[in-house]
């Protein structure tokens, strides 16, 4: 059985360490917060200007002035601090955030990432993604192994406009886990239960070393 | 000099002209100057270049200025919540300059602080870096980005005093403090105007020197993604 969204989030949560400051992207990465081990102390950063992000509010706690980067209502914790977008990206660009988990459309075997636009089709923007991958110490991508049409998303070279060059350290897909030595190459280090190396090869264009 | 104005319309009087550049604070719909955006629309000013992280939604915030085609160009990091924006852009009716969010924030900060340019590693190796000066520092490559300024900045804060000292609330702060510094004229709308001396001087986020005009507004504070959890019942 390949991993589902929650399994991928649970696996990504294992990359968090005690004392880490972590930025979680929108979509599956947001789910990582549900699987942070109780034995470690982690502070979540939201790039719209908050450190110490709490869970979603109860119905009577909703505050329009308190949202995360996905524009969802959230809550504060006793450790929370608020700051401007300039300070927020100072933290990010300045290398003070330990780990970022984000989604992707394509990742190359050298660690290039594309996740912000499809020319002629999707005009949304990069938001904070380019700053995050340029500045955060370690970047973990969580994504489906292939596109909805079945095309591989792990490629020799990205075909879409890049978010960053040689910026990804790990990719977690529904089929397994890849470690990337930025600029050098990638290695398959784990398989999801019931998934074979041949299954992965069939859905991967990128060159990788099998270490499973 | 009196900084407090009776309403948004009065606060924009004499400040708007066709082809002007306007910075507008907020992240999504959080911390946007709702009243001043409406008043800007009502001036009928055209061909505006708007610098704002987002473009509102179809029927709120800067979406109003898109509906009336008063915006010529947007400088933003993310516009994914606005279908009218996407339609106008893909039809070639609207210019768009995407900036990475942190670069946009720093460009506003730099513009207000008298810094004409700065180097950043954000965007190196992407389309953002095309045509920009590259320079290596300590073995890493950076690109040159420029500071941004505006003819007018419209800003939302929580509280102001008559001097224009501002306090923001929670994540509604976002781009507002930098934009307040980068406008030739900065107009602020607040939820409450408080007596001088009632805010702790150590806790003021934006000093009044950056603020020229102030109004007290009425705020709908629309929520984009109302996300809640259920209480466990015992």
Image: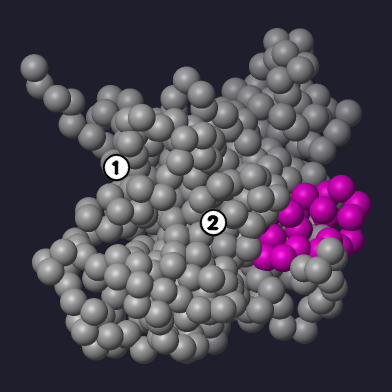
Which residue is pictured at 41% across the width and 86% down the height? A206
SS assignment at label 2: strand
Q: How many marks?
A: 2
Q: Who comes first in sequence, dot 1 or dot 2? A: 1
- Taking B74 as reference, is A110 left or right? left
* Magenta stretch contains residue B105: yes
Q: Circle 2 sits on which residue?
A: A138
Any part of residue B40 in sight: no
Which residue is pictured at 76% across the width and 10% down the height? B197
SS assignment at label 1: helix
- Taking A168 as reference, is B121 left or right? right
- Taking A147 as reference, is B59 left or right? right
- Quadrant of image for the C terminus of chain B: top left
Any part of residue B198 in sight: yes
Considering only vertical position in the picture, is A56 above or below A209? above
Q: Which residues are magenta?
A: B101-122
- Taking B168 as reference, is A185 left or right? left
Q: Which mark is residue A35?
A: 1
Gap between marks 1 and 2 measured at Cα: 19 Å
Dot 2: chain letter: A
């Amino acid at each position: 059985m390949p991993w589902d969204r929650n399994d991928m989030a649970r696996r990504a949560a294992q990359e968090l360490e005690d004392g880490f400051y972590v930025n979680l992207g929108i979509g599956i990465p947001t789910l990582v917060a549900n699987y942070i081990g109780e034995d470690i102390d982690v502070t979540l950063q939201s790039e719209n200007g908050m450190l110490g992000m709490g869970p979603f509010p109860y119905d009577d706690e909703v505050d329009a002035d308190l949202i995360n980067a996905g524009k969802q209502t959230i809550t504060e914790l006793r450790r929370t601090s608020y700051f401007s977008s300039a300070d927020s990206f100072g933290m990010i660009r300045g290398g003070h955030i330990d780990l970022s988990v984000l989604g992707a459309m394509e990742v190359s075997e050298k660690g290039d990432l594309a996740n912000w636009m499809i020319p002629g089709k999707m005009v949304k923007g990069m938001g904070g993604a380019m700053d995050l991958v340029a500045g955060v110490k370690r970047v973990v991508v969580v994504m489906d192994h292939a596109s909805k049409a079945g095309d591989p998303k792990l490629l020799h070279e990205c075909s879409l406009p890049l978010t960053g060059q040689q910026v990804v350290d790990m990719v977690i897909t529904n089929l397994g886990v890849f470690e990337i030595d930025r600029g050098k190459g990638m290695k398959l280090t784990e398989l999801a239960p019931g998934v074979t190396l041949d299954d992965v090869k069939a859905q991967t264009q990128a060159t990788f070393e099998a270490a499973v | 000099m009196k900084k407090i104005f009776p309403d948004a319309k009065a606060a924009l009087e004499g400040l708007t002209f066709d082809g002007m550049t306007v910075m507008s604070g907020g992240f999504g719909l959080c911390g946007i100057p709702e009243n001043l955006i409406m008043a800007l629309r009502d001036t009928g000013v055209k061909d505006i270049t708007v610098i704002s992280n987002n473009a509102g939604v179809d029927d709120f915030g800067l979406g109003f200025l898109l509906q009336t085609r008063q915006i010529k160009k947007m400088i933003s990091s993310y516009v994914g919540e606005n279908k009218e924006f996407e339609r106008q852009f893909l039809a070639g009716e609207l210019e768009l300059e995407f900036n990475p969010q942190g670069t946009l924030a720093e460009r506003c900060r730099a513009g207000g602080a008298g810094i004409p340019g700065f180097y950043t590693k954000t965007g190196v190796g992407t389309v953002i870096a095309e045509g920009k000066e590259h320079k290596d520092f300590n073995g890493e490559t950076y690109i040159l980005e420029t500071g941004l300024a505006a003819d007018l900045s419209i800003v939302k804060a929580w509280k102001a005093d008559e001097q224009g000292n501002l306090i923001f609330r929670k994540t509604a702060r976002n781009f507002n403090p930098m934009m307040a510094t980068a406008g030739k004229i900065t107009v602020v709308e607040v939820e409450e105007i408080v007596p001088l001396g009632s805010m702790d001087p150590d806790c003021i986020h934006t000093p009044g020197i950056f603020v020229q005009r102030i109004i007290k507004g009425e705020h709908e504070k629309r929520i984009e993604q109302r996300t809640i959890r259920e209480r466990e019942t015992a």
